[in-house]
Image (spheres, rainbow, N blue to C red):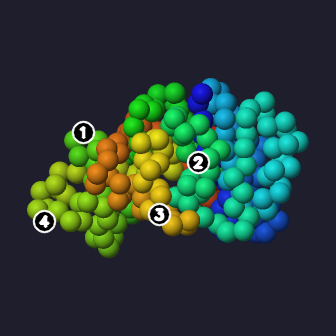
Amino acid sequence: MKQAMIFAAGLGTRLKPLTDTMPKALVRVGSEPLLWHVVQKLKLAGYERIVVNVHHFAQQIVDYLQANHNFGLDIRISDESSMLLETGGGIKKALPLFDPSEPILIHNVDILSNLDLNALPMDAPLLVVSERPTKRYLLFDDEMRLHGWTNIETGELKGPIAQVQSSKLQVQCRKLAFSGIHVFHPSLAPLLAEWPDRFPIMDFYLKACGTHLIRGYEAKDLRLMDVGKLDTLDQAEAFIDGL
């Protein structure tokens, strides 16, 4: 069974004032909410079980899904109403709602893209990345194994690469931008036990990649839009039409 998680718990502060009265997941792009676009993309790719985490105006999301009969899917709610758990804590809390033997595709609710979800290898932890300008990059070797993270403006390094004395590996590593789409693999689940209730998943990956294989998947010709700000909403409608 193919299973996925949609991160929909965020406060959506960059989309104020719309998110003063609704969750980001229900902000419309074109005629449908962001959540609809992501659910439909997952459904078309054959995903049957989807967990949606909720916090900000949580009940509105629950009501929306019920009103649409969960779009004919096994959709489950991971309720973070009492405390927003960030991305890593959100996955940790949601794990009991999944089949523990199967990988989980993780997808931000505000990401629209032309990515072919069925092209992703699911046999190991995977971060979908692409070549595009940003301040913060993930660092991969020539076999696309994750070694760290860097902020090119500040020079800050995180992950195993920060402990490497030689700058040779740093120079050799490819800098690729994270898409907000990734595969959480069951092999990593035991490592979550030592983490707190609330933490960013990227911090977890950057620690885990020192002992576990975490690969990057470079999506060629990726067209991706982060619909996180008001000024991207109009662009997003044209973007969706273009897809």
Say the numbered circle drawn on residue 95. Answer: 2
| Residue 24 shown left or right of residue 168 in the figure | right
Q: Amino acid at mark 1?
A: Glu
Give the CA separation, mark 4 to mark 1.
21 Å
Give the CA separation, mark 3 to mark 2.
14 Å
- Residue corresponding to mark 4: 165
x and y, in percent, of residue 61 in the image: 79, 52
Q: Is residue 87 above or below residue 100?
A: below
Give the CA separation, mark 3 to mark 1.
28 Å
Which mark sits nearer the N-terminus, 2 or 1?
2
Q: Residue at x 22, y 41 (%)?
A: 142
Q: Residues within 10 Å of mark 1 (few under 14, many from 20)?
A: few
| Residue 58 shown left or right of residue 152 in the figure | right
Closer to the observer: label 2 or label 1? Answer: 2
Which mark sits nearer the N-terminus, 3 or 2?
2
- Residue corresponding to mark 3: 195
Give the CA separation, mark 2 to mark 1.
29 Å
Closer to the observer: label 3 or label 1? Answer: 3
Asked whether residue 23 is in view, the answer is yes
- Label 4 secondary element: loop
| Tag count | 4
Which mark sits nearer the N-terminus, 4 or 2?
2
Closer to the observer: label 4 or label 3? Answer: 3
- Residue corresponding to mark 1: 143
Front-most of residues 172 and 62:
62
Front-most of residues 191 and 87:
191
Q: Residue at x 56, y 65 (%)?
A: 197
Q: Amino acid at mark 2?
A: Leu
- Label 3 secondary element: loop
